[in-house]
Amino acid sequence: MGTLVELKVPAKERASLAFSNGLSDGRSARSTNGELTPYLEIGIDDYARGFRAGFFGCGNAPSRSLDGV
């Protein structure tokens, strides 16, 4: 049998500034029936992920920054 390892997740992560900005812009776009551009549909940076979270109403889940900040 394998060894059990406890996974510890930080209690609260802070979202990056880019994610927060994208979240706000996504919520605004949803309220005005905006459309997703190809960048916003498939972008993997924090802004695009935040935009999709706001656009699709997924809340404000924290995001791990790609640049390590």
Image: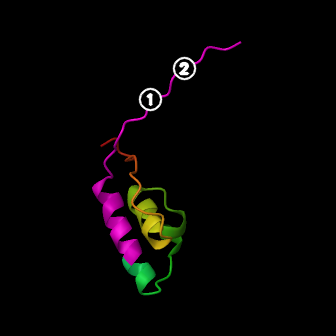
Considering only vertical position in the picture, is 12 above or below 36? Answer: above
Residue at the image point whose x is 51% and y is 23% from the top: 6
Residue at the image point whose x is 67% and y is 14% from the top: 2
In the image, the segment drawn in magenta is 1-27
Residue 13 versus residue 69: which sits nearer the camera?
13
Q: Is residue 18 in the magenta section?
A: yes
The disc labelled 1 sits on which kind of residue?
A: Lys
Residue 56 versus residue 46: which sits nearer the camera?
56
As drawn, is 57 to the left or to the right of 13?
Answer: right
Displayed quadrant of residue 50: bottom left
Q: Is residue 50 in the magenta section?
A: no
The disc labelled 2 sits on which kind of residue?
A: Val
Considering only vertical position in the picture, is 18 above or below 54? Answer: above
Q: Assign the C terminus to one quadrant of the image.
A: top left
Residue underneath mark 2: 5
Q: How many marks?
A: 2
As drawn, is 35 to the left or to the right of 12?
Answer: right
Q: Assign the N terminus to one quadrant of the image.
A: top right
Considering only vertical position in the picture, is 57 above or below 33? Answer: above
Residue at the image point whose x is 53% and y is 68% from the top: 41
Q: Which mark is residue 8?
A: 1
Residue 47 rendering spot, x and y as whole percentages: 38, 62
State the separation of the CA atoms marked 2 and 1.
Answer: 9 Å
Residue 9 versus residue 35: which sits nearer the camera?
9
Residue 30 rendering spot, x and y as whole percentages: 45, 80
Residue 64 rendering spot, x and y as whole percentages: 40, 46
